[in-house]
Image (cartoon, rainbow, N blue to C red):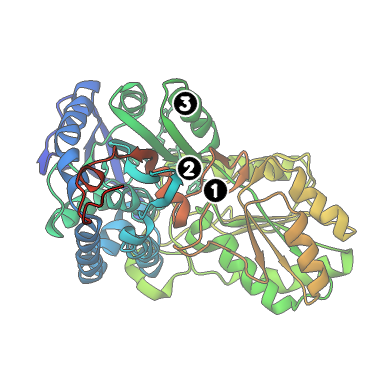
Amino acid sequence: MQELTHYINGAHVKGTSGRFADVYNPAIGEVQAKVPLATTAEMDQAVQAAAAAQPAWAAVNPQRRARVMMKFVDLLNQNMDKLAEALSREHGKTLPDAAGDVQRGLEVVEYCIAAPQMLKGEYTDSAGPGIDMYSMKQPLGVTAGITPFNFPAMIPMWMFAPAIACGNAFILKPSERDPSVPLMLAELMEEAGLPKGILQVVNGDKEAVDAILDHPVIQSVGFVGSTPIAEYIYGKGCSNGKRVQCFGGAKNHMIIMPDADMDQAADALVGAGYGAAGERCMAISVAVPVGDDTADRLIEKLVPRVEALKVGPYTAGNDVDYGPVVTAAAKANIERLVQTGIDQGAKLVVDGRDFKLQGYEDGFFVGAHLFDHATKDMDIYKTEIFGPVLTTVRAQTYEEAIGLAMDHEYGNGTAIFTRDGDTARDFANRINIGMVGINVPIPVPLAYHTFGGWKKSAFGDLNQHGPDAFKFYTRTKTVTSRWPSGIKEGGEFSIPVME
Ligand code: NAD
C-alpha cells in the first residue's frame, strides 16, 4: 500500500499523526494509497518554513517571479499525460476531462505571468506642494488554501499561482480524496525554480483546516468546496481576522425557450449535466423548459441521448463519456436522493438504478438518470446531488422560469437557450447568479476574467482568478512623501548681484 506524504519545505515528509485517509481508485473500488492527516504541529512546521522563506521571495522582482510561472507552464505541458493519469486514477474522471482540469489551471498560471503589469502601483506627482503620493501592492505573507476533490489540479492552481506570483508563500490543504496531483504540482513548481517553503502541501482533514484557521501567521484563506463547510471557514477565518474567500455548492438551471434549437439544447444538456458524472460545480443539474410543448420536445430529444451515454473507467480513454463518482458514500448519497425523487412524485424517465459494468462491479459507477415533472419543493430540486442526475422542472412562462433560478438558494452558474436576443439580454441583466451562459451550457470564465457565484455559492468580496486574484493576494500601502528642502536651495549658483 502506497503511503503518501506531506510536502514541507521542499521535501516529502511522512505524516506523524498516525491518522490516515484511504485514497480509492473509484473505477475498481479499491484503496490504492493512504494519505496522512496532519496534526496542528505539522501545520505549524509548514507555516514556520513558509514564514522564513517568504520575505526573500517577496524581494525577488515580479519579472523573475513570472519567469518561474513560465517555466512551470512548460513543465505542466511536458507532464500533462502523467498528471492526467494520476488525476483520473484517484478521481475517476475520463482522461480527456482530467487533461482539461490541468489545462484550466495552467491557463491561470499563464495569466499570472502578467504579474509585473498587475502589480504596478499608482503614483500622483505633486499631490500637494512638494508632496508626492504613491500606492504599492504588497504581498500578504503566508497564505493558505483548502480545495475540493472535484478539480484537484485546476483549483489548487487557481489559488497558488496568483498567491505566489504576488510574492506570498502558500500552504495548500488539498482534498484527502485525491491528493497525488497537488503533491506533483508542488514538485514541478520547485523544478521551475521556486524556492523551498514557498509552496507546501499539508494533507489533512478538519484538524488541519482548523490549524490553518487558528494560525496567527496565516494572513488569508481561500476555500472551494461544499456550502456548509464554506460558511464555517468563512465565519471562523473572518472572526480570526483573516482575509477569506469561500466558494460553495451549486444548483445550476438551464432555461430552454420555445424558440431554442432543441438538438443543440439537448446536446448541451447531456454534456453539462452528465460530464464528469455531474461532479462539477458548474454542471447543469436543472433543465427548465418553458411551456409543455417545449418540455415534450426536449424530453423526446434527451431520452435517447441520455440512454446512449457511455459510462466506464478512465482506462477506456476517449470511449467513455463519464466515469465513476468519487466514493461509495457519494454513490450511496446519489442513490438516496434519486429515491426521494421517485417517492416525492417526480417522473424518472431514464432510470440508471440498475446500471452495472461488467468487470467493474465494485467501482463507484452510477447510471445516468433523467427526471421530468419535478417541482420546487422536492429534495432533488433543492439539494445539490453532485451526480449524473438531471432534473427537469417545467415552467409555463419565461417569468416563472427566471423566477425559479432567482429564488434558488444557490447562484453559481446558469444558462439560457434561445434564438431571441431580447430574452437573452433580459435574462443576463436580471438574473441574480454570478456566471451566465447564453446558448453556452457551462459558462466557466477564462483565466483573465473572474470566477465566482452569488448567494450561497460564494462568501467574500472578490472572485477567483483574473484581476480579483491580484487584489485578494495583495494589500495596498499608500505613501505620502515630502522631502525637506535640500542642497538645491542650499547652494546659490547665479552670480551674486548687489541690491
Ligand atoms: P467538501 O466541502 O466536502 O470538502 C472541501 C474541502 O474541505 C476538502 O479539502 C476537505 O478536506 C475540507 N473539509 C471537509 N469537511 C470539513 C470540515 N468538517 N471542516 C473543515 N474542512 C473540511 O467538498 P468536496 O466534496 O471536496 O467538493 C464538492 C463540493 O465543492 C460541491 O459542493 C461543489 O459544488 C463544490 N465546488 C464549488 C466550486 C465553486 O467554485 N463554487 C468549485 C468546485 C467545487
Q: Kindly identify the amino acid type of the residue bearing the numbered disc 1.
A: Phe
* Residue lying farthest to the front in this orientation: 499
Label 1: state its secondary structure: loop
Label 2 amino acid? Ala
Q: How many marks?
A: 3
Q: Is mark 1 within 8 Å of ligand 1?
A: yes
Q: Which residue appears at 60% of the width and 67% of the height?
A: 270
Would you say the residues marked 2 and 1 are in contact, meaning their CB atoms lie under 8 Å apart? Answer: yes
Crowd band around label 2 with a 10 angstrom C-alpha radius: few (<14), some (14–19), many (20+): some
Crowd rating for badge 1 (residues with CA inside 10 Å; few <14, some 14–19, many 20+)? many
Alpha carbon of mark 2 to alpha carbon of mark 1: how far?
8 Å
Task: Give whichever of discs 2 and 3 has the lower sequence position.
Answer: 3
Nearer mark to the viewer, of 2 and 1? 1
Left or right: 389 as drawn, with respect to 475 = right
Of the pair 31 and 125, the residue shown nearer to us: 125
Q: Residue at 26% of width from left, 61% of height from top?
A: 83
- State how far apart marks 2 and 3 are (Cα): 30 Å
Left or right placement of residue 483 versus residue 282 in this view: left
> According to the image, label 1 marks what residue?
386
Q: Is mark 2 within 8 Å of ligand 1?
A: yes
Q: Mark 2: which secondary structure?
A: helix
Image mark for residue 238: 3
Tell whether label 3 touches label 2 (CB within 8 Å).
no
The amino acid on which the numbered mark 3 sits, given as a three-letter code, is Cys
In the image, which disc is placed on residue 249? none
Q: Secondary structure at mark 3?
A: helix
Ligand 1 is within 8 Å of the C-beta of the residue at disc 3: no
Q: Residue 330: which disc? A: 2
